[in-house]
Image: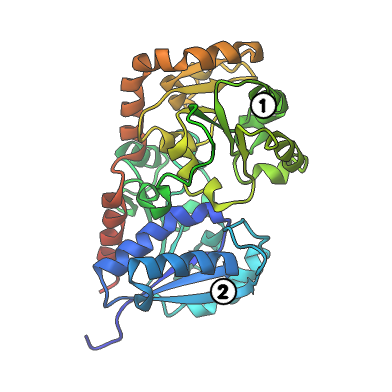
């Protein structure tokens, strides 16, 4: 080539929950195209440490340059991949922008970084947005999404939702659900001393979508008091921002030997808790789709008694029993396994429609899409 090899920059500037959506694509790209100059811009020692370890395990540390974004922070006491405090994003982006001018493509998983192409049009042909989360509750109408040159989407159904909003078809590429290729999805180390079935309770963080505010504390108390299930309490990572008392509630619950509670560890976001559970209990988190990659029983919580069948954003509630009374929970949990066969077909259809291709093939497809998008 008459010029230097193309440079692809990946932005790891947000919460750690975004990392598993982006890292599998970076790894697949570095494996598929070793001549490319691949950069991982990180915002903290937590992000850097996780990525450095995985690159070393994959044998590609020499192919990816780890770089520290302006405002990078060191947190030597955070050693479990905890979500660290982050600097204000807009000043970080303003200072980072000149350093991204040499990149042929810039890949991000969060919308805040799309302020750069939105405000600086000369960046627009560089920015590629990959989806984080999936299913009917994605925030597709945020105007920043239109600033991305191309969006990598999990499924044809997801693509249709963007076409209906007026997005140009040539700016939408279906590649599958990249997070399902993440290396952290392996079953976590043994959490409990016995072999009772495992239930995971994963309430959403947004008040209007969450069961936490109406029922959460009562559900935790009930799960501590019962003895049929081992319990993983793994709320959305951002719930603690909205309810500072969450940490104390879960810490108290975790004193019970059959309860494992987490608000900080990377297992909160890497999918391993979804892999470890036998039953999903929750409301509207898209993690249920990751859980259903391997179909299992679900119970959904509807404290606001929404007419969910009349909306477009609760489609996955067809994958399990929906309860709108708190006192119905014990019986719902008791019969969930017996009722599962009636929901399994719907679960498989929901995952196929929402996530498309899963596993390593999804990350590989995203990597090939990026290679094809490199300006010639």
Toward the bottom, the furthest residue is 2
Q: Which residue is mark 2?
A: 69
Q: Estimate the x, y position of residue 259 in percent, counting from the top left.
A: 62, 34
Question: Considering depth in this image, is 278 or 245 the residue closer to the camera?
Answer: 278
Q: Where residue 166 appears, x then y in whole percent?
A: 40, 43
Q: Could you say where residue 313 lies in the image, as x and y percent from the top left?
A: 49, 29
Image position of 304 with respect to 102: above or below: above
Q: What residue lies at 49% left-to-right and 26% top-to-bottom? A: 314
SS state under label 2: strand
Could one spot residue 282 in this view of the protein? no
Q: Give the residue pinned by disc 1.
A: 224
Question: Horizontally, is 81 left or right of 212 in the view?
Answer: left
Q: Residues within 10 Å of mark 2 (few under 14, many from 20)?
A: many
Using the image as rendered, state which of residue 127 and residue 256 is in the foreground: 256
User: 277 or 161, which is in the foreground?
Assistant: 277
Q: Nearer the viewer, mark 1 or mark 2?
A: 1
Residue ID at (30%, 47%):
359
Q: Is residue 187 left or right of residue 250?
A: left
Q: Residue 32: where, in percent of width, then height?
A: 25, 66
Residues tagged 1 and 2 counted as in contact (Cβ below 8 A):
no
Report which quarter residue 183 is drawn in.
bottom left
Please identify the quadrant where the N terminus is shown: bottom left
């Amino acid at each position: 080539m008459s010029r230097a090899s193309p440079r692809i920059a990946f932005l790891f500037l947000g919460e750690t929950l975004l990392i598993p959506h982006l890292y599998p694509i970076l790894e697949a790209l570095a494996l598929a195209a070793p001549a490319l100059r691949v950069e991982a811009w990180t915002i903290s020692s937590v992000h850097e440490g996780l990525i450095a370890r995985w690159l070393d395990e994959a044998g590609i540390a020499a192919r990816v340059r780890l770089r520290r974004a302006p405002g990078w922070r060191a947190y030597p006491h955070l050693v479990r991949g905890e979500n660290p405090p982050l600097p204000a994003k807009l000043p970080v982006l303003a200072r980072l922008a000149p350093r991204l001018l040499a990149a042929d493509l810039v890949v991000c998983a969060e919308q805040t970084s799309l302020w750069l192409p939105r405000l600086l049009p000369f960046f627009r042909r560089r920015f590629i947005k990959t989806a984080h989360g999936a299913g009917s509750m994605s925030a597709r109408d945020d105007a920043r999404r239109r600033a991305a040159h191309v969006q990598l989407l999990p499924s044809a159904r997801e693509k249709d939702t963007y076409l209906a909003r007026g997005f140009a078809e040539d700016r939408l590429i279906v590649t599958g659900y990249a997070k399902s290729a993440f290396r952290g999805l392996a079953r976590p180390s043994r959490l409990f001393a016995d072999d009772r079935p495992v239930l995971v309770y994963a309430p959403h963080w947004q008040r209007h979508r969450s069961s936490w505010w109406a029922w959460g504390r009562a559900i935790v108390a009930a799960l501590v008091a019962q003895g049929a299930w081992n319990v993983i309490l793994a709320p959305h990572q951002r719930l603690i921002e909205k309810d500072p008392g969450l940490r104390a509630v879960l810490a108290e619950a975790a004193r019970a030997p059959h309860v494992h509670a987490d608000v900080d560890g990377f297992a909160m976001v890497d999918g391993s808790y979804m892999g470890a559970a036998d039953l999903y209990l929750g409301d509207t988190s898209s993690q249920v789709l990751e859980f259903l990659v391997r179909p299992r029983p679900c119970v959904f919580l509807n404290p606001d008694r929404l007419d969910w069948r009349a909306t477009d954003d609760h489609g996955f509630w067809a994958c399990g029993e929906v309860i709108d009374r708190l006192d119905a929970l014990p019986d719902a949990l008791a019969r969930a396994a017996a009722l599962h066969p009636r929901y399994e077909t719907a679960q498989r259809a929901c995952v196929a429609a929402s996530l498309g291709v899963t596993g390593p093939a999804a990350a590989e497809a995203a990597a090939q899409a990026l290679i094809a998008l490199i300006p010639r």
